[in-house]
Image (cartoon, rainbow, N blue to C red):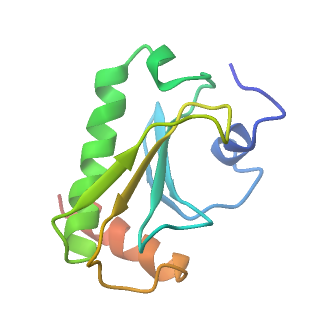
Amino acid sequence: MNDPACIFCKITKKEIPAEIVYEDENFLAFLDIKPESPGHAQVIPKEHFRYVWDVPNAGGFFEVVKKIARAQRKSFETDWILSKIIGDEIEHAHIWVYPGNPARGDKNNLKENAEKIRQVLSNL
């Protein structure tokens, strides 16, 4: 079930544009519009859950996070990938995944960064 007022639910329904880097039946990953570093992604369940701990398939959720992290390492030439689970800024379960420093690239070039990640994911 989705929340019609939730911005992340609107992204999953493609009502709001986003630089999507990964999508499957249950999860979506897209670039953050206020990135901490190049390739900063949000990984979310497509179904609306308030907290990460409420997602029934938490193992599948974290497997997607792992895929994104591995793609970021190659895309931005860094081994240091950070993640955060806070959940106060958007009331939809999400995990921040982003390269630490040094990470190669312009954090504000979302289109290019998304393409880099998608390209690596297609080869994993």
Numbered-mark total:
0
User: What residue lies at 62% left-to-right and 23% top-to-bottom?
Assistant: 50
Image quarter hosting the C terminus: bottom left
User: What residue lies at 41% left-to-right and 74% top-to-bottom?
Assistant: 38
Q: Quadrant of residue 49?
A: top right
**Frontmost residue, 107 versus 3:** 107
Q: Quadrant of residue 99?
A: bottom left
Q: Compared with residue 90, is residue 49 higher up or lower down, i.e. above or below?
A: above
User: What residue lies at 51% left-to-right and 36% top-to-bottom?
Assistant: 86
**Frontmost residue, 64 versus 79:** 79
Q: Compared with residue 91, is residue 51 higher up or lower down, i.e. above or below?
A: above
Percent x, y for residue 25? 46, 33
**Frontmost residue, 116 versus 38:** 38
Q: Compared with residue 4, is residue 20 higher up or lower down, i.e. above or below?
A: below
In the image: residue 61, left or right of residue 36:
left
Percent x, y for residue 41? 46, 57
Q: Quadrant of residue 113?
A: bottom left
Image quarter hosting the N terminus: top right
Percent x, y for residue 83? 35, 48
In the image: residue 58, left or right of residue 112:
left
Q: Compared with residue 96, is residue 109 higher up or lower down, i.e. above or below?
A: below
Percent x, y for residue 46? 56, 33
Which residue is the extreme one toward the right? 5
